[in-house]
Amino acid sequence: MTRERTGLLIVFEGTDGTGKSTQLQLLARTLTEKGCTVISSREPTEGQYGQQIRALYSNRDSVSREEELALFLADRKEHVDTVLNPGLTAGRIILCDRYFLSTIAYQGAAGMDTAQILEKNAFAPDPDICLLFQASIQTGVDRITGGRGEELNDFEKADYLQKVASIFNEMDFPYIHRINAAQSIEDVSRDVLTAIEPLLEKLT
C-alpha cells in the first residue's frame, strides 16, 4: 500500500528465539549514534488490544482463532494510526519488532487462511525492508529456555513454531531480506547493517 512518506519502516520478523529483538536494539543504537531519528516499536503493542493479546500467552485457548485475529488487527490498526503513519510522514526511521507477516505466519499456523489474513491487513503500510531472521527451531527454543531462562508460552511450542517457520519460508514478498540468525550476535548485526545500507543512502 503506497503512502506519502519520507521515513523508513524496517521490520524485524522471525520465529521466537532468533534474536530479532536484540538486533533491533543494536540497530537503534547504531542509527542514533549516526544522528538518525529512530522510533523503536513492537507488536503486540502496549495498548489496550496489545495487552489483551499478551494475556493469551499463558491462556491462548480462552478465545477462538477468529477472536484472536481480530485482536491483532485492532492492535495493528491503532499502531498504524498513532505511530507508524505519523512517524513515516515525519521522516522518522521506524524499527518494528513484528508486524503483519507474523500474523500471517502465526495465525496461519493455527489454521487460519493466510491469503485472507494478508487481505485483512491491507490498511497497514508495507515495510521498506523486512529482516527475516532464520535459525532452527531447536536453536530458538534453546535460547528461550536456556539463554533467557524462560518457560515456553502458548505461542512458542516447538511443533507449532515449525509450522510458523514453514509459512515464513514460503513468503516471497519483494521487501523480505533473509538473515542467518544462527550466527554470532556480531555477525548478524553486520548482516543487518549491510542489508539496510542502500535504504539509508536514499535518505541522505
Image: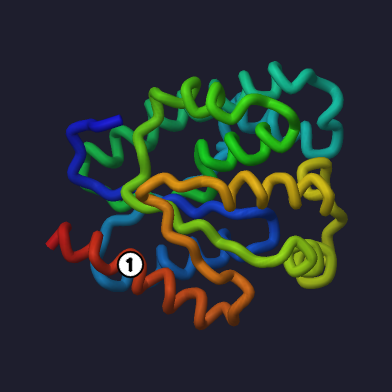
The image shows a total of numbered marks equal to 1
Q: Residue at x 28, y 49 (%)?
A: 8
- How did the renderer colour the structure? rainbow
- x, y (%) of residue 188? 51, 75
In this rendering, the answer to whether 190 lies above or below 113 is below
- The residue lying furthest to the left in this view is 204
For disc 1, the marked residue is: 31
Q: Is residue 170 visible?
A: yes
Q: Nearer the viewer, residue 25 or 161?
A: 161
Q: Is residue 136 left or right of residue 118?
A: right
Q: Nearer the viewer, residue 76 or 37?
A: 76
- x, y (%) of residue 63? 79, 20
Q: Residue 113 is drawn in which quadrant? A: top right
Badge 1: how crowded within 10 Å, few (<14), some, or many (20+)? some
- x, y (%) of residue 60? 82, 31
- x, y (%) of residue 2? 24, 32
Q: Residue at x 67, y 32 (%)?
A: 107
Q: Residue at x 77, y 43 (%)?
A: 155
Q: Locate the N terminus and report the quarter of the image it occupies.
A: top left
Q: Residue 55 is drawn in which quadrant? A: top right
Q: Is residue 10 visible?
A: no
Q: Residue at x 83, y 41 (%)?
A: 154
> Which secondary structure lies at badge 1?
helix
Q: Locate the C terminus and report the quarter of the image it occupies.
A: bottom left
In this rendering, the answer to whether 42 lies above or below 181 is above
Q: Amino acid at mark 1?
A: Leu
